[in-house]
Amino acid sequence: MMGEMKGRFAVTVGLKGGTELIKTAKSWAQTLALPYLKRPRGVSLETLRIERNLAGLLVATRKGPQVETEEGILFYHPSMATLRVRALKEGKTDHLVEALALRPGSRILDGTLGLASDAAVISYAVGPEGTVVGVEASPILYQMTRLGLRSYDEGDEDLVKALRRIEPVLGDTAAYLETLPPDSFDAVYFDPMFEHPVEGSSNMVPMRPAADHRPLTRSVIEKALKAAPLVVIKERSRDFLSELGAQEIQGGRYSRIKYGIIRRTP
């Protein structure tokens, strides 16, 4: 599957890309085993992507990495994590924190890292003693997020520290789970974000063509339950969560987002 994902993407530079940016883009391409595309003068990212029949481009710009898809341009930003961490600091609850039973020192695997918005909240909640590893199958999202976690420095200092502690991994989550010894983590989290998209999530639209759209299956959940005694799945559909074996569903009474909880049976 990783080969199929990589075949959909390439790396290039912004219009004002000089020698250093070109060097950076070529380095990314080599690291990710993606083709580097020379950016002809005056050729738009859209034209370059369409001509090569690609789902997305990872672009080295003076402002940092960006991803271009048919749905628009995406820059790294922790999104709602900013507000959620602020709420936690004010003593408010967070449904994901509750569903994962997070405490300082917890070891959590995020099997669908994306832009690490949920991972950022998890990382803040588990603190410096905890561990948060995030697996991302899309090479261009992985690279943008990896660099963003290192460089993002706006707003709350505790959020920035939480971002730095996240350990991103490029790969297939099912394959990664198979490499883990039993009970490597306290919980595994999944957000199959495009199974039932939330209307109005416009900030996520450019991400969709670049993401891994394979459905979450019971087979992957079984692997996760060997790596951790608890699996939590974020979804909008109660029926979907029930089909995957959720024993309990948590979430705000009026929230469109629910968390399905699956515990390892003896």
Image: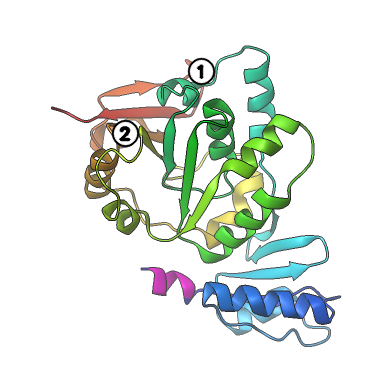
Per the image, label 1 sits on a secondary structure element best described as: loop
The amino acid on which the numbered mark 2 sits, given as a three-letter code, is Leu
Q: Earlier in the sequence, mark 2 or mark 1?
A: 2
Can the viewer see residue 99 in this picture? Answer: yes
Residue 18 is situated, as x and y percent measured from the top left of the image, at 85, 79
Q: Between residues 39 and 134, which one lies in front from this camera angle?
A: 134
Q: Residues within 10 Å of mark 1 (few under 14, many from 20)?
A: few
- Residue at 63% x, 26% y: name it: 84
Q: Which residue lies under the disc numbered 1? A: 254
Q: Which residue lies under the disc numbered 2? A: 241
Spatial separation of the CA atoms under disc 2 and disc 1:
17 Å
Q: How many marks?
A: 2
Q: Which residues are magenta?
A: 2-6
The amino acid on which the numbered mark 1 sits, given as a three-letter code, is Tyr
Q: Please check the rendered image and state whether residue 5 is part of the magenta-colored stretch, yes or no.
A: yes
Q: Please check the rendered image and state whether residue 71 is part of the magenta-colored stretch, yes or no.
A: no
Residue 108 is situated, as x and y percent measured from the top left of the image, at 43, 36
Residue 221 drawn above or below residue 47: above
Can the viewer see residue 199 in this picture? Answer: no
